[in-house]
Image (cartoon, helix red, strand yellow):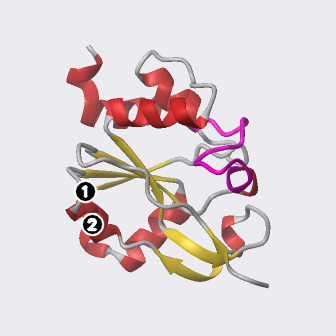
Amino acid sequence: MTAVKGFAPFYTEESVLLILGSFPSVMSRKEGFYYGNPQNRFWKTVCGYFGESVPADIAGKQDFLRRRRIALWDVVISCEIDGSKDASIREEEVADLPALLNESGIGRIFCNGNKSYELLEKEFPSLLSVTQKLSSTSPANPRFTAEAWYRALDTVFKEEKQ
């Protein structure tokens, strides 16, 4: 099996929050941007928090992220993987998270699911003090709740949301 590459980080110098996934799904890799599976609850949840509808295309999603000062990346930037299954990730190359944090205003990290948190905890334990683990927005996660995401987003954006 050959290694599959993920995406470069999406961020600006003004980004204050990094939402960190594990590795892009097959559908996301096909679309060419984060959370490309229409069944994934990520865009509906984060856009809904700000009272916005989900943008129709990648450019619209990037504009939303820029305006809201949200960065996206994955802990794993290259790996061998069976389809979209996090549990099958092996031979992983991890992202240089400290470099990203140094190039931006990011002060908080939300891990989208257990796998991203486990990898961050293993590779970058010094970042745990600014990190919060949230339930995965993946359609495969039956325990997802938008309310937990909204509470977490309130810790960063409550004043801006008013």
Residue 32 located within the stretch drawn in magenta: yes
| Residue at image location 56% in from the left, 33% down from the top | 43
Secondary structure, magenta segment, majority class:
loop
| Residue at image location 46% in from the left, 57% down from the top | 73
Residue 36 located left or right of residue 16 = right
Residue 151 vertical position relative to residue 6 in the rendered view, above or below: above
User: Which x, y percent locates residue 36?
Assistant: 67, 43
Q: Work out whether residue 152 can be spotted.
A: yes
The one of 151 and 90 positioned closer to us in this rendering: 90
The one of 92 and 55 positioned closer to us in this rendering: 55
Q: Which three-letter amino acid code belongs to the residue tagged 2?
A: Leu
| Residue at image location 31% in from the left, 37% down from the top | 69
Residue 89 located within the stretch drawn in magenta: no
Residue 148 located left or right of residue 25 = left
The answer to whether the residues at label 1 and label 2 have Cβ atoms under 8 Å apart is: yes
Give the residue pinned by disc 1. Answer: 130
Q: In this picture, which residue range is highlighted in magenta?
A: 28-42
Which quadrant of the view contains residue 54? top right
Give the residue pinned by disc 2. Answer: 127
Which quadrant of the view contains residue 124? bottom left
Name of the residue lying farthest toward the front: 59
Residue 89 located left or right of residue 159 = right
Mark 2 crowdedness (10 Å alpha carbons): few <14, some 14-19, many ≥20: some
